[in-house]
Amino acid sequence: MKLRKVTAASAAVLALALTATACGSEDKNDSDSSASGDSKTIKIGIKYDQPGLGLKEPDGSFSGFDVDVATYVAKELGYKPDQIEFVETKSADRENALARGDVKLIAATYSINDERKQKVDFAGPYLLAHQDLLVKADSDIAKGTDLNGKNLCSVVGSTSAQNVKEEIAPKANLRENAGYSECLAGLQSGSVDALTTDDSILAGFAAQDKYKGQFKLAGLKLSNENYGIGVKKGDTTTLNDVNTALEKMVSDGSWQKAVEANFGPANYKNEPAPKIGDIVS
Ligand code: GLU
């Protein structure tokens, strides 16, 4: 009887000790995750329809270079992968999503330019891409001016659409959609002669099983697209932390690994890692 009492008491002590340990580690996790903010999760805007960059997979997971960059940066800010909430942020929504506070960061093939810098701050750049054309494999469109009078498709709110209207081919019949799937369907059916956006994005589309052999990239470097991570205007602390994280991602080899994993399958020959603050105009 006495022995049983002692055992019960020890068990209670042990249970208490375990509870205390559990609480302790929970507290630690909480403080880790709130290192750069008060919430336990971080919302990051990405694209959902760009294979190799930002893609929502059928099982609900996310893949792509932007997703890997976002996950690395979030880790450096104190958030584990399960504390990241990815939010679809289409091209035309990016500035507003940051201004409204819907997301803390945007890693969505987001080119740094002066107009956008009036509304948001950019960390980076972390990738240099170029505007190009995706055409049917047998198309004879070979240069930007060939687009005048042709049916061209791009995404609303993108630098690509703006460049076409202002510089590359003002007489092209430009159709602007919210996302890329409508442009790809049009290219396949022949109602669209070319899809224009960054070569990094186009390479991912061309390599998809369902389009294999049907399309080709024209291989034109029509612009320089310096991808930055969008941060709310004036949030200097986050901006500096993200820049530090991006520098580390390059120096510890994670950037190169992410490039190979995401651009390798599409055979996209990316430019070398840019230096933070170095914008190629
Ligand atoms: N990188 C370009 C841009 O930021 C085109 C791709 C996109 O819209 O995401 O506008």
Image (cartoon, grey):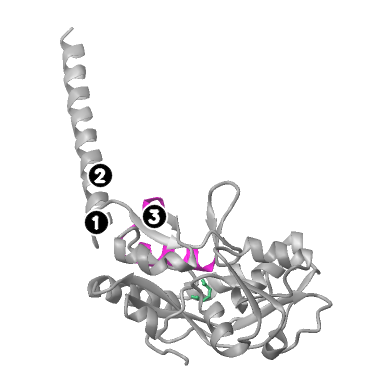
Residue 228 position by quadrant: bottom left
* N-term-proximal mark, 1 vs 3: 1
The image shows residue 49 at horizontal and vertical percentages of 58, 60
The image shows residue 185 at horizontal and vertical percentages of 71, 62
Q: In the drawing, what numbered circle is on residue 66?
A: none
Q: Kindly indicate whether the residue at mark 3 contacts the one at mark 1 (C-beta within 8 angstroms).
A: no
| In-image side of 55 versus 194 (left or right) | left
The residue that disc 2 covers is: 26
The residue that disc 3 covers is: 84
Q: The residue under label 3 is which amino acid type? A: Ile
The residue that disc 1 covers is: 34
Residue lying farthest top?
1
For image coordinates 36% across by 77% down, the residue present is 123
Q: Nearer the viewer, mark 2 or mark 3?
A: 3
For image coordinates 23% across by 59% down, the residue present is 37
- Per the image, label 3 sits on a secondary structure element best described as strand
- Whole-angstrom CA distance, mark 1 to mark 3, is 12 Å
Residue 188 magenta: no
| In-image side of 203 versus 62 (left or right) | right
The foreground one among 201 and 142 is: 142
Relative height, residue 232 to residue 127 (above, below)? above
The image shows residue 134 at horizontal and vertical percentages of 70, 76
Q: Kindly indicate whether the residue at mark 3 contacts the one at mark 2 (C-beta within 8 angstroms).
A: no
Q: The residue under label 1 is which amino acid type? A: Ser
For image coordinates 21% across by 44% down, the residue present is 24
Q: The residue under label 2 is which amino acid type? A: Glu
The range drawn in magenta is 64-85
Residue 125 position by quadrant: bottom left
